[in-house]
Amino acid sequence: MPSRKPTILVSGGGIAGSAFAHWAVRHGFTPTVVERFPDVRSEGFRIEISAGGRRVLEHMGAVDLLDGETGPPPELEFRFGESAAPVRPPGVSVGDETVVGRTALVRALHTLRGPGTEYVFGDSVTGLEETPDGVDVEFENGPARRFDLVVGADGLHSNVRRLVFGGTTADHARYLGTNLAIFSVPDLTGQRDLSSALVKPGRGAVLTTMPARDDLEAVLLHRSAAAPRSLTQDGIKAEMARVFADDGWEVPRILEAMRDAHVHFAPSQQVRMDVWSRGRVVLLGDAAFCPDPMSGMGAVLALKGAMALAGELARAGGDHRAGFFAYEAAMRPHVEHAQSLGGLAVSGVAPRGGALGFQAMRAGVRLLSLVSRLVSYAPRDDEPGFPLARQLPAADRDGGLEAA
């Protein structure tokens, strides 16, 4: 590696960007993270971290920082109609997953920023021009600067992706036919460690308890032929109230609580790109490979991708093209597996309407059992292509990490 520490601009201070900044410092780079929010993000809800994702967090030192903020996944309970008795699906194991709030995870990753990491809040990238020696970057508020490399970790609607690859989100994303509204509500059930769902043709409502929280996470899902265009908070709430107006169970109380809540609205979309880099710019996390909000695998892919990208850039010894190529080769199997499950989880909670939808509604628990088994076949982190120890800084490796 060159004697001067290469500088890397990271656009996006969420899970992917903050995790990459941590690994970049450990590998000898100098990262600058620019985040459009005025402070560390406080939005976001429950995240399930797989065993592989937890191993990455352990190597980062994040697990101790999250003490008291995590827990096992809740039990699953489904009602196939308001009057039906609750059913707990067979064969769905909580396994080794760990549940954590997105806010707690992002704050822990920010705390683990290495020495020399610069965070710039309240700003965003507006222009990128590659030169033989680096990338000239223009910002919305700050002065222009030059960096050796740029990492676009700025989410589904990535600004860096638009500037480098062209097009809008719609040009790079595949709509899966479902819309999600997620928000916090008071504890309506009095139960802990439980995720309860009302399943109807074409729509579903879910209430889930969260570790270290007294409130609940509410999720409303419904199918539509096209993703709605830029809805306001009032527009989102009006649409959810219309779709779920005639439903029973806890839905009336969920809709009542929604009136005063901030609703995160997300159409189910996957980002699928032929390549993740161009020149000195590379994409990471949802900007490159958003798997689908309902897959529960976005955070894990972001953590693994951040570790792989920093590790492969270091191994490439200054050849960013080789580093980007190796990063993509390491991550493609994980991304393809995660995206192959897109829509399956939704089908168990918001099955398609009509006669087939009614049958799917009854088969939903079996489908979720299948999804649970399919997730267990995800590529392992110690298999060729993503050996965990290879991504670690040399000083941190030991004989037991190859099989971690």
Image (tube, grey):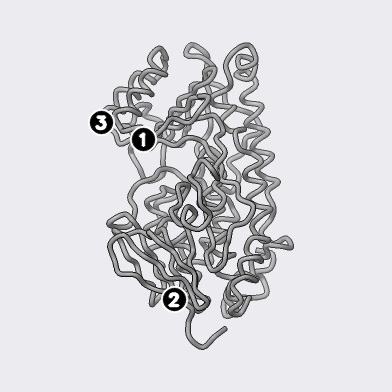
Q: Which residue is mark 2?
A: 30
Residue at image x 62%, y 43%?
339
Mark 3 neighbour class, 10 Å CA radius: few under 14, some 14 to 19, many 20 or more: few
Given residues 313 and 187, the one toward you in this image is 313
Near-viewer residue (45 or 84) = 45
| Helix, strand or loop for disc 3 | loop
Q: Are marks 2 and 3 in contact (CB under 8 Å)?
A: no
Q: Which residue is mark 1?
A: 183
Q: Secondary structure at mark 1?
A: strand
Q: Amino acid at mark 1?
A: Phe
Name the mark on residue 260: 3
List the single residue furthest toward the left. Answer: 260
Q: Quadrant of residue 40?
A: bottom left
Mark 3 residue type:
Asp
Q: Secondary structure at mark 2?
A: strand
Find residue 294 and report its horizontal and vertical position in percent: 53, 37
Q: Position of residue 399 (x, y in %)?
A: 67, 75
**Residue 319 relative to residue 187: left or right:** right
